[in-house]
Image (cartoon, rainbow, N blue to C red):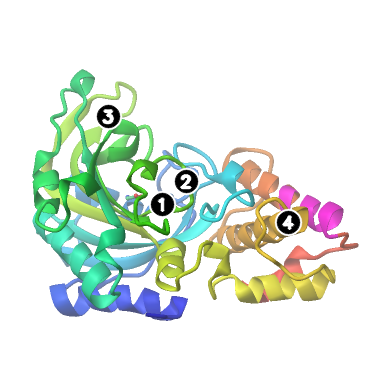
Amino acid sequence: MSRTAAQVRSDFLEYFRTRAGHAVVPSSPVVPHHDPTLLFTNAGMNQFKDVFLGTGTRPYKRAVDTQKCIRAGGKHNDLEDVGKDTYHHTFFEMLGNWSFGDYFKKEAIDWAWDLLTNIWKLDPLRLHATYFEGDAAEKLEPDTEARDLWLRYLPKERIHPGNKKDNFWEMGDSGPCGPCSEIHFDATPGKDGGKLVNAGDPRVIEIWNLVFIQFNRAPGTGKLSPLPAKHVDTGMGFERITRVIQGKTSNYDTDLWMPIFAAIEEISGAKAYRGKLDDHVDIAYRVIADHIGCLTFAITDGARPSNEGRGYVLRRILRRAVRHAHQTLGVKGPMLCKLVPSV
Ligand code: GLY
């Protein structure tokens, strides 16, 4: 089934709006102006932190959105992978559905399975799920409830326990958090990539993370305490699911990046993008395309390159994009500003 990226985005929003009564809400800015614990918005749940903590409310109990995210500093940082691989970005969109003290694990898992296999018709034999194996030091039990819910859809060989690093989601050093259950897509020819789940192999990638928010980690002490209610926070990598649905092996081979690559080629006069992982020109295309997206959204949402904090992260990103444009593609003079319309 081939869908454009724009169709994939609207499929997601419409599924949760029409089938399960979710309010469609806008993305928050990629710069978290009111949260000093974060450099950038790193997940869809950031804008709902007050609801999870019980200090704020919204006029709905279920929401769906696509959130602009930057993971280029702080706890979640993918900056060093950009350009070298096919599926990490500093700037990306995260599709998410949310329950604020309303539905919990069963509904989140049922709807995820339905959307992936019945609406988008992904091959069920290529799907794996993970669940939290527990952590004795933090007195956290294994999430056997999530495991058992998955057993209704998947054989036990494709349900994998995972440790705190992979299966206990936290937005930063403090804040709302909880065990999570990830869905991975196996693109190996023999559909036998079980051992590659969470192994950093591009053939088996995480596509969707279902987080069951139940705790708050206190600033300073790091102590976990239960929240007043239980919530669902899911995050699906929009660029990744688009790649899977379009049957590509790289996020950069989807229609999301074509306009930016075309603009880079036209402005630089470089040879066309060929998608090779070890080719300096192709690496430069990926770095520049990723970084101009990040810079455009960050600056539009109110950040500025500078010499401290988030501004310094942006300055490093800006410098790296300029270096690839000048040194690798041989561009003389300004180039990045000319790419903004393609973003
Ligand atoms: N909050 C879910 C995720 O970022 O994976």
Q: Which mark is residue 204?
A: 1
* Predominant secondary structure, magenta span: helix
Q: Residue at x 46, y 42 (%)?
A: 200
Pick out the residue farthest to the top.
137
- 67 displayed left or right of 262: left
From mark 3 to mark 4, how far is it between C-alphas? Answer: 41 Å
- 300 displayed left or right of 131: right
Q: Are marks 4 and 1 in contact (CB under 8 Å)?
A: no
- 10 Å crowding of disc 3: few (<14), some (14-19), many (20+): some
From mark 3 to mark 1, how far is it between C-alphas? Answer: 34 Å
Q: Earlier in the sequence, mark 3 or mark 1?
A: 1
From mark 2 to mark 3, how far is it between C-alphas? Answer: 34 Å
Q: Which residues are magenta?
A: 320-329
Q: Secondary structure at mark 3?
A: loop
Q: What residue did someone put label 3 on?
A: 218
Q: Looking at numbered disc 4 in the image, what kind of residue is underneath it?
A: Ala
Q: Earlier in the sequence, mark 4 or mark 1?
A: 1
Q: Residue at x 41, y 80 (%)?
A: 3
